Amino acid sequence: MRLYSFGMIADFQELSDKIDRLAELAQALRRENSQLRQANASLVADNLEYQRRLGEAHARVMALLDKIPAAEADTPEDAQ
């Protein structure tokens, strides 16, 4: 007596193939997710560095502005 028909065996093989493809896709997604996490970490570090540099530049500009003497009210333009 035959327990499985040819159709059932084909169905099991198709299901097995689909499971294999799903496992491959899951592995590919894990690799991609890992790469994206690494890229994100790198971008976050870059952003922090740019923010630090921007803060330093801001501080230098403010220090330079503090050194500029204030305009006096007796300039020739005001006399007119």
Image: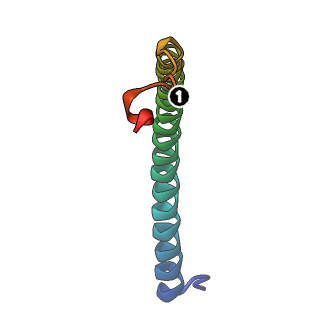
Give the image location of residue 69, x and y in percent.
49, 15
Report the quarter where the N terminus lies: bottom right
- Give whichever of 78, 9 is nearer the camera: 78
Q: Residue furthest front?
A: 80
Q: Residues within 10 Å of mark 1 (few under 14, many from 20)?
A: few
Report the quarter where the C terminus lies: top left
Q: How many marks?
A: 1
In this rendering, is residue 11 above or below 26? below
Give amino acid for label 1: Gln
- Give whichever of 22, 6 is nearer the camera: 22
Give the image location of residue 61, x and y in percent.
47, 20
The image's colouring method is rainbow
Circle 1 SS class: helix
What residue is shown at x 45% (from left), y 51% (from top)? Answer: 28
What residue is shown at x 48% (from left), y 23% (from top)? Answer: 71
- Give whichever of 8, 23 is nearer the camera: 23
Give the image location of residue 25, x and y in percent.
47, 58
In this rendering, is residue 24 above or below 55? below
Give the image location of residue 52, x and y in percent.
53, 22
- Give whichever of 48, 73 is nearer the camera: 73
Per the image, the residue denoted by label 1 is: 51
